[in-house]
Image (cartoon, rainbow, N blue to C red):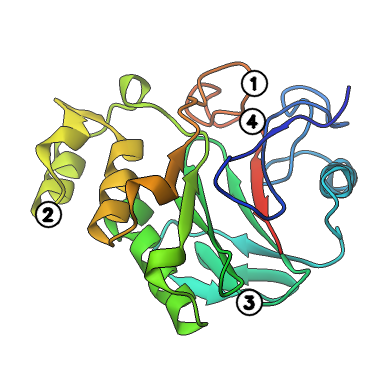
Amino acid sequence: MNVSFLTSPILQTPHAFFTRHGGVSPAPYGSLNFGGTEDDPENIRINRERALTAIGMNPHNVARLNQVHGGDVLVGKNGSQTGDALVTNESGLALAIGAADCYPILFHDPVNNVIGAAHAGWKGTLARIAKNTIEKMIDLGAERAEIRASIGQGICRNNYEVSAEVIQQFLSAGFPDSIHSGRYLDLLAANQFVLSECGISNEHTWSLNRCTSENDFFSYRRDNGKTGRMWAVISQ
């Protein structure tokens, strides 16, 4: 099976939101697992190399993250760093975000040649990781009016029940009532709100609108933690 991935119509630079299909990992990590599990590291290496090569990226020039569900944004460098978002203006460097229910968000300023990638779980969303990424891109020369943002697959509201305390944290942080229905949290809507709050126009915002509960994706919640990780990647 060929490597399976999805793309955004508004990102005019190499990028991909990978599905779980087209790799070499056995169940329960089948098959395009990028890490974060008990899978054989050699399978993960092969999957990463196969996937990035398939979309024309250099698998040996990738900035990736040890993600900690926070709001920190780093300037990407080849290899692993600790945080939850990356930005760069370096040509040829791929930025990679891992996810298995949290939302990956990819950013591109095509005029000033700056890209970003963010991992938005509930804690990162609450910390406005998308806003922090945009501001870090601006530090590298991006212009707010030129930034495009695309949100990949993640857990949808109907499948994401959280505690009343988590809902209250969002409301106390200025998020609108529309981001929840009772104890069901809509992380996609919350991140769309942050992008709008940051001044990113509707024309420069796009969402995949796919839920990780679907069979095409890994889901930490659906699979009770015994699952793989997908990558979202972007380069220029």
State how far apart marks 1 and 2 are (Cα): 34 Å
Between label 4 and label 3, give the one nearer the viewer: 3
Q: Note whether residue 116 is visible.
A: yes
Crowding near the residue tagged with mark 2, few <14, some 14–19, many ≥20 C-alpha atoms within 10 Å: few
Q: Which residue is mark 3?
A: 89
According to the picture, the residue beneath numbered tag 4 turns out to be 227
Disc nearer the start of the sequence (3/2) = 3
Tell me if label 3 and label 2 are in contact, CB under 8 Å. no
Question: Which mark is first along the chain, 1 or 3?
Answer: 3
Which quarter shows the N terminus? top right
Query: How much space separates mark 1 and mark 4, taking CA atoms?
Result: 13 Å
What's under tag 2, amino acid-wise? Gly
Is 170 placed left or right of 202 in the picture? left
In space, the residues marked 3 and 1 are separated at their CA atoms by: 32 Å
Residue 101 has which mark?
A: none
Q: Residue at x 67, y 52 (%)?
A: 233
- Identity of the residue drawn at 77% across and 22% down: 27
| Amino acid at circle 3 | Asn
Q: Secondary structure at mark 1?
A: loop
Apparent side of residue 106 relative to residue 171 in the rendered image (left or right):
right
Residue ID at (58%, 40%) = 9
